[in-house]
Image (cartoon, rainbow, N blue to C red):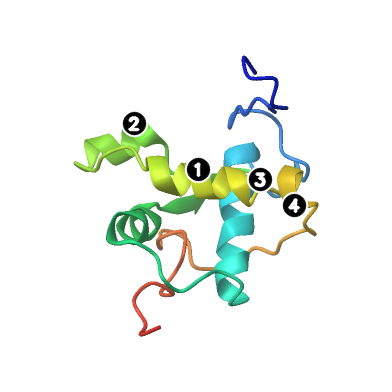
Amino acid sequence: MELGVPVTPYNGREAPFDKERFVNVRAEDFWTLREVFEAGEVDDELDDVLAAQLGSIKWTLDSRGRIKIESKDDMRKRGLPSPDRADTLAMVMSRRATGGSKVDVDSHQGESITGNLLDRPW
């Protein structure tokens, strides 16, 4: 902002576009990122740190059946560092930034946010 570049503030705790499916915007944005991976629309040359971060973020459903992404505090309790690179990628790929379409929920609760995508050979 100091340089006169347009900046959009990001708060992952804000309400998502799809309030019936997601707990907050962070969950919606990571799920959008997951779909981008599943569609094969991401460069396959991820650095090791980013790949590890993406593969370590877990998700669950809340009591209303909405997707909830593991908090950074919960990740720290599991001995993991803050997923800064993964957060940045999710923000860049955010539906707010890309104008993406709605996303679907599958039944793989507790898996990493990218499922098995990072485990398979590229």
Amino acid type indicated by mark 2: Asp
- Asked if the residues shown at circle 2 and circle 1 are in contact, with their CB atoms under 8 angstroms apart, the answer is no
Amino acid type indicated by mark 1: Thr
The residue where tag 3 is placed is 22
Q: Nearer the viewer, mark 2 or mark 4?
A: 4
Amino acid type indicated by mark 4: Thr
N-term-proximal mark, 2 vs 4: 2
Q: Secondary structure at mark 2?
A: helix
N-term-proximal mark, 1 vs 3: 3
Q: Nearer the viewer, residue 54 or 57?
A: 54
N-term-proximal mark, 1 vs 4: 1
Q: Distance of mark 1 from mark 4, alpha carbons?
A: 14 Å
Amino acid type indicated by mark 3: Phe
Query: What residue do we see at 80% from left, 59% from top?
Result: 101
Q: Is residue 121 visible?
A: yes
Q: Distance of mark 2 from mark 4, alpha carbons?
A: 28 Å
Check the image and report above or below for 12 versus 57: above
The residue where tag 4 is placed is 98
Callout 4 crowding tier (Cα within 10 Å): few <14, some 14–19, many ≥20: few
Query: What residue do we see at 63% from left, 52% from top?
Result: 93
Q: Nearer the viewer, residue 68 or 3?
A: 3
The residue where tag 1 is placed is 88
Q: Distance of mark 2 from mark 3, alpha carbons?
A: 19 Å
N-term-proximal mark, 2 vs 3: 3
Q: Secondary structure at mark 4?
A: helix
Callout 3 crowding tier (Cα within 10 Å): few <14, some 14–19, many ≥20: many
Q: Nearer the viewer, residue 48 or 21?
A: 48
